[in-house]
Image (cartoon, rainbow, N blue to C red):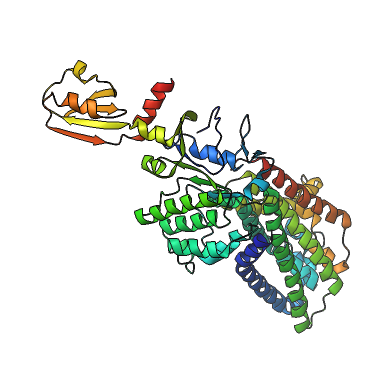
Amino acid sequence: MGVKNLDLSVSEGEIFGFIGPNGAGKSTTIRLLLDLIRPTSGQASIFGLDCHKNTVKIKEEIGFLPGEIFLPESMSGRECLNYFKGFKRKIDQKYENRLVNRFGLDLRKKVGDYSKGNKQKLAIILALIHKPKLLILDEPTSGLDPINQTEFYNTITDTKKWGTTTFFSTHILQEAEKICDRVGIIKNGKLLAIENIDDFREKNIRTISLETTESLPLSGLKISGVKKIERTTSGYRLTTSGKNGQILKTLSKFRVEDIKISEPSLEEIFMHYYEKHS
Amino acid sequence: MINIIKRQFNEQKNSVLIYLISLIGYSLLMISMFPQMKKMDIEALIDSYPEEIAKFFGESGMASYGTIEGFLAMEFLSFFFILILMFYIGSAAGSVIAGQIEKKTIDFNLSQPISRTKIVLSNTIIIMFFSGALVTLISLSIWLLCQSYNIDISAKGLTAFTILATIFVWAFYGIAILLSSILRSKIGVTLLTVGFSLASYVFLSLSRVSDKLKDYDRFSIFYLYNPEEVLKTGNINWTHIAILASVFIIGLTGSIIIFNKKDV
């Protein structure tokens, strides 16, 4: 997936979430920033430097976590750590030890013998070890269990202490809500919106599933805040935005057997933004 | 660069040792066979073969079997030795770019503060070192084995052969690393490198047999590599060396240019 007219800037010290479904162009954007691929037109810059011309200088201050972890399998965790440390200028040994302990990684094992989660942990340590100014993370928690996910969120939040900026892609909404300052929403290579995380939360996009055997009047369901009404086999599904109080009050007039309020799929959220911006 | 060189040294040393032991073993076999071979009536053997087959064995024909230089060149150094080294060169060069793309380790490597040029050059240094070391150690083992079997072989000839064979192998590295920057499969690079050396050798051999092809022998890279002559005379054709060095430099430079422009 290519990206078109992508224009966004991330401020120093912020955690910026790049949200989009698979194939939206998140990884392509990251690969452009890392000079793994080149733009057909336009340019990308980090720290005010061109990502292609100054790629080596930029990478001195970058920590990168790829979406899929492919590390040298024949090395032990320690050898792998030492190998990649060879590219960095300065390493805070105490911080390195703290990271290794935090994620509880056995560095004596061969990388090839690590589970997916342990490879992910090693890659996280490698991305953070030199206290980079910018962290670029592509789907960073995909292989982690909930405990290590929490450790990861805490570690990323900690990096703000020394002014690290984090740019990370995800398709997990709660993840973005948990740690991001701002989010950019991308679909089909186009940036649909950039939202402050508080505004994003304020939108409170939800799905309300109504279970009923009755046929409800559509006009009655067209309440302020209801963005979409769909008929399902067991009733109706409403996509809503904002506070749900008024909606629930209106629904109480109908004979509804059950009601479920859930977070909508990313697709529904993107549709919300897509409709808004088209 | 140093950490890449160290890592490549550690990763390749065992496989290089296996290549070395195998090639020394084959040298031992050949050199131990030579005294028996020398006792055979080579002239009678030549007469019993058709002219084309005799031609296939080169300018001096099967008479070469009577000398250690000719015998080693025919049975070992002309092609088998190069073929084995091509597997190493193809596989090592294939790992530098194509293999990393194939294994997807390239993303993490290229996210480090090192240029693509330095990645290629660091790997090149270690492959040049190991291939040069393989050729030198095989030449040295041939000399030592000949001494132990009381066979006279010219040290000057072996030195000249070491220089020629090393540059010849590096020229193939130039081709292999160029392929590595174009293809996305390590095995593809290895097979094409080995295949090219095989095709080139067969073409040169055919050009010696076929009157139609005899004027085209220069189109084979093996035309620049004549171990028998070098072993016997100890003289190096510096024009050939310059051509081989050019192939290496052009291949390496081309691979760096392509890799630097490549989307991975």
Q: Is residue B176 left or right of residue A259?
A: right
Against A149, residue B157 (above or below) is below
Residue A142 or B44: which is nearer the viewer?
Answer: A142
Left-right relation of A140 to B158: left
Residue A218 point in image, percent of width and height: 20, 17
B195 vs B123, nearest the viewer: B123
The residue depicted at 58 percent of the width and 40 percent of the height is A33
Residue farthest toward the top in the current orientation of the protein? A219
Q: Is residue A253 above or below residue A108?
A: above
- The answer to which of B160 and A177 lies nearer the viewer is A177
Viewer-closest of B246 and B118: B118
Q: Position of residue A198 (x, y in %)?
A: 40, 35
Q: Whole-percent x and y of residue A192?
A: 46, 28
Left or right, residue A214 beside residue B128 = left
Number of marks present in the image shown: 0
The N terminus of chain B, quarter of image: bottom right
